[in-house]
Image: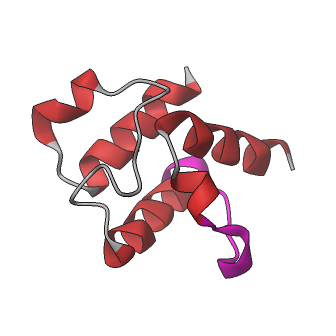
């Protein structure tokens, strides 16, 4: 399932350890996960690009994509479809 794969990438990129297991589609990310600062966003995007073989342009990323784990998953899904 794509959500689980995105969750794994996010957990690894942010080094969340066991906390990632509690995350679900509605888990807030930006502003709620202390590790997710501006530099970490870049790390997560890079990790997603590598894992899913997608390319993310700078102007495609906004706070809305990182609102929840679900919104981030839907963003990846749109990149895979496009």
Give the vertical position of 42 relative to 63 (above or below). below
Residue located at (24% from left, 33% from top): 20
On the picture, is 59 further left or further right than 1?
Answer: right
Judged from this view, the residue extending furthest toward the left is 18
Where is residue 75? Give x, y as percent.
68, 47
Q: How many marks?
A: 0
In which quadrant will I find the N terminus? top right
State yes or no: residue 54 in magenta: yes
Residue 6, percent across and down? 47, 38
Where residue 43 sits, quadrant-wise, is bottom left
Side (left or right) of 37 relative to 81: left
Q: Indicate left or right for 80 with 10 as reference.
A: right
Instruction: Give the residue at x 49% y 26%.
Output: 25
Does 9 sit above or below residue 19? below
Viewer-proximal residue, 24 or 13? 24
Residue in view at x 50 percent, y 59 percent: 50
Q: Quadrant of residue 36?
A: bottom left
The residue at the far front in this view is 31
Quadrant of res 49 = bottom right
Q: Residue at x 33, y 69 (%)?
A: 40
**Image spot of residue 27 (x, y percent):** 40, 32
Check residue 57 for magenta coloring: yes
Q: Which residues are magenta?
A: 51-62
Residue 42 pos. (x, y %): 43, 73
């Amino acid at each position: 399932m794509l959500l689980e794969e995105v969750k794994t990438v996010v957990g690894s990129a942010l080094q969340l350890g066991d906390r990632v297991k509690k995350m679900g589609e509605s888990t807030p990310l930006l502003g709620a996960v202390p590790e997710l600062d501006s530099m970490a966003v870049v790390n997560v995007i890079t990790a997603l690009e590598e894992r899913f073989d997608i390319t993310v342009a700078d102007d495609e990323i906004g706070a809305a994509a990182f609102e929840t784990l679900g919104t981030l998953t839907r963003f990846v899904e749109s990149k895979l479809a496009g």
